[in-house]
Image (cartoon, grey):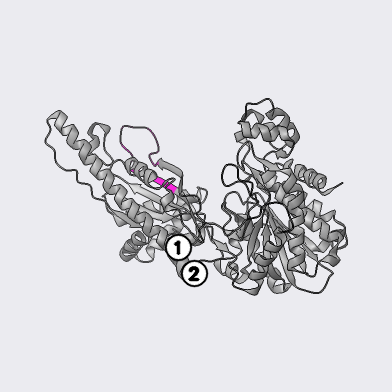
Amino acid sequence: MNIEKEMEALTVELVNIASVNGTEGEVRMAEAVESKLRSFSYFQHHPELIWSKQVENDHLGRKSVFALLRGKGGHSNKTIILHSHTDTVPTDDYGQLEAYAVQPYELMEKLKEVELPSGVEDDLHSGDWLFGRGSVDMKSGLAAQLWTIQYFCEHPHELDGNLLFMTNPIEETTHGGIIDALTELERLQTEEHLDFVTAINSDFVGPLFSGDHSRYIYLGSVGKLLPSFYIKGSETHVGQMFEGLNPNLITSELVRRIDHQTILADEEHGEIPQPPSVLKAKDLKPSYNVQTPLASFVYFNYFVHGMSPDRVMEQLKGITEEAFQQVINDLNHQYRLFCDRTDFNFQPLPWESKVLTYEQLYQSVYDLYGEKVNEHLNQVVKKNEESDLREIGARIVEELLYMQGGIEPVVVIFFAPPFVPHNYVKGETNNEKKIIDNLQEITNGFDDDFPIKYFFPSLTDSSYLALDDSDEEIIGLEKNFPEMDKLYPVPIDKIRTLNIPAINIGTWGKDAHKMTERVYKPYTFNTLPLFIKRFCKKMIY
């Protein structure tokens, strides 16, 4: 078999294993990967160099799989990590074709019977694309890394150093797999004296605009914050609606001013991530009646390249103050119009814009109650431990407002899980310069266009291998992140100790997380594994 056929067969084999995030399929996927690794000749002679680590306190027993290949070209401790994730997003978006979502060949036949956009239809009939959930995100990338490991298992003398294969679960939601695996990487760094010179992720890469065919290589990872807003209004009967302040009005104005607002997008090295996007907006009224809601809750995805949490908080607090005041102005305008039409006497409404950061709210309550506040918040977390992590943050804010005792409308801004660090290879050390130089040299050996950019534009586990935020910036985050040490404990010290330069040399395809997800075979099943192989040889030979 040639490399393209090997890669396609392996990718299809992996896609066939449904491994939707949050299901037992993630466990089956890890077991299948471990079994595949154990079939390689090198590991048949060294079975002790394959092992797994179960994610701590995981109710499904999900696990990360590791395999250490020691090269025989020398005695170097230099080690490259090949890392990937095994989970996918759900398949319900396939609708009536869901049964075929992880059966690429059957799915492609069924898609021929469906009306598709012209570009998708052209790809489907070209023979150059493989469709299916996980085909591009990122089981073809996992296949490329398995192929690379297998190659060096058969040619260990070409490697003066080591390859550490690592694949993790829980990437598509909270990155729980890689965070848990940091303990194992730290152990290998300390006990086995492995010198991690770089980590290669092979997550999906695709066109950044219509007609884009570049195979981007990324020197780092975008960061992510989840700014959240608890909005307390003033309830009233709908028959006296101007006597209250509906928090949904403020929620709507915040969404209008933040969602898709490109001016808010961070910028570093001339690269701009996607602007903020609303991920959830709702009021907190539990059931129907004719009383207006007392409170609402909204949070946004917020990508960052270099902007600190404090700067994001400052920016959003200013926007919120303006949004709150705009709602008050609009309400006064509408009330004046209503009074004019009904011959009522107009009096300005009593509302005033009040916006607090979580740090401000917490400190005001702590000044009243001291350590009793922390004891109470511990109980709130325990009582709601089965709830969505973001909802727990909202309930903590709700409890603090209750303890504070104020009755006036207020918006409280806080950060909720997950926190995804940003990082990139800067070329400041000899090792980082070598990474960049080798990437540039290897790209010249292929016909494809390989622009090298700084920040992988989608979320990736690579974010947790190095940290560019300063200690001061992390402290600023923690002050506005309710119970971060319990709800989303990120091992900052471990990440700083590891400090692994992480790059992405990924699969190429289209429509990740859509029912038309597909991977481009000529590049992904040929060029990609050869590129990774050459880079590994140049870095540790």
Q: Is residue 359 left or right of residue 463?
A: left
Q: Position of residue 266 (x, y in %)?
A: 46, 56
Which region of the structure is painted magenta?
283-299
Residues 536 and 98: in front is: 536
Q: Position of residue 414 (x, y in %)?
A: 41, 55
Up/down of 77 relative to 209, above or below? below
- In the rendered view of the protein, which quadrant contains the C terminus? bottom right
> Which residue carries the number 1 mark?
308
Q: Is residue 538 left or right of residue 493?
A: right
Residues 378 and 166: in front is: 166
C-alpha distance separating marks 1 and 2: 9 Å
Q: Residue at position x 30%, y 50% from top?
A: 322
- Report if residue 354 is visible in the image: yes
Look at the magenta stretch and give its main secondary structure: loop
Q: Secondary structure at mark 2?
A: loop
Q: Residue at position x 38%, y 43% from top?
A: 256
Residue 498, image quadrant = bottom right
Q: Position of residue 247 (x, y in %)?
A: 32, 43
